[in-house]
Amino acid sequence: MQNFGLIGAAGYIAERHMRAIKETGNNLTACLDKFDVMGRIDSYFPNADFFVEPERFDRHLDKKRRTANKIDFLSICSPNYMHDAHIRMALRNQADAICEKPLVLNPWNVDALEKIEEETGKNVYNVLQLRLHPSIIGLKKKIENEAPDKIHDVDLTYITSRGKWYFISWKGDMSKSGGIATNIGIHFFDMLTWIFGDVEKNVCHLYEGNKAAGFLQLKKARVRWFLSLDDNDLPANTVEKGMRTYRSITVEGQEVEFSGGFTDLHTKTYQNILAGKGFGLNDARKSIQITHDIRAEKPVGLKGDYHPFAANNL
């Protein structure tokens, strides 16, 4: 049995980590979150120590490091801009880090963490659960079995409506979240490069606080993408159904169905990590570079091969 710590225990994604720790037969011994209404812990690990101050949590990890009950893994579900520091906290306390997306905001942060991995002998793992989805695995195998020079036309559309709270929170601050392409798009960009190969061209057509669009030329695909938090961008049939989220990935006009099958992907992620097969720093690097380049680039407007939804916003 491995001992786990968890940072960001009050966030919505943290419960998936708690469930994964429990379902893999391990123990959550310490949690950190400044929000102190934490009844959810009672359903999983009621005996876990709980901290609201990072300094005391760090001291606790350090004390445990010197005992037989040290923390083996630190799961990180904190806001994006804190990931780098919290990963360093894990490695410094001789624990492997399991971090939610985005692993870090900038490519050079990955380089620095690589050096700390070498210094400490511990590992950094990123939660890239779409790579474990059966439909995505099936698509990857299909592409691998085709002619190596075949180039596919891919459209990615993801609209997830958010209210005013989003833009007041850290998620609305680009310096903290990395902006919309990072905050809600990075796992899609990771999935697409995992399937279709390296980036050869990255063009941004539109970039605003609540929506973005662009084009990626990958080794085996031309990808038009559109991301939005604005419910005005939802297709009419989605609105008629009373839904506030629309997600679509098409390859040669054919929909890739992966709306279900998400419930146990965090548990599969943990199983892989515990078996020594987790996704590390180099796995995360491509999508971090993509999103960094998108927000660093000046949008070109409706030029070249752009997503049709972008035309409604420019």
Image (tube, rainbow, N blue to C red):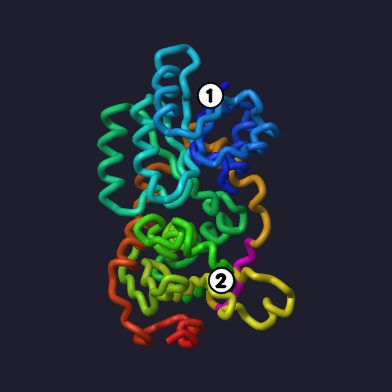
**Which residue is most to the right?**
241
- The percent coordinates of residue 307 (x first, y second) are 46, 81
* Residue type for callout 2: Ile
- The percent coordinates of residue 31 (x first, y second) are 53, 32
- Whether the magenta-drawn stretch holds residue 167 is answered as no
Looking at this view, is 33 or 261 the one in front? Answer: 33
- Whether the magenta-drawn stretch holds residue 255 is answered as yes
Give whichever of discs 1 and 2 has the lower sequence position. Answer: 1
Judge whether 213 appears above or below 118 on screen.
below
Residue under the image location 54 percent in, 23 percent down: 2
Residue 195 in view: no
Residue under the image location 41 percent in, 57 percent down: 177
Our reading of the magenta stretch's main secondary structure is loop
> Position of 97 compared to 261: left or right?
left
Residue under the image location 38 percent in, 68 percent down: 218
- Secondary element type, mark 2: strand
* Residue type for callout 1: Asn
Q: Which residue is mark 1?
A: 3
Judge whether 215 appears above or below 11 on screen.
below
Highlighted range, magenta: 253-258
Q: Which mark is residue 309?
A: none
Q: Which residue is mark 2?
A: 159
Q: CA distance from mark 1 to mark 2?
A: 38 Å
Residue under the image location 43 percent in, 73 percent down: 212
Judge whether 233 appears above or below 280 on screen.
below
Q: Residues within 10 Å of mark 1 (few under 14, many from 20)?
A: some
Position of the N terminus by quadrant: top right
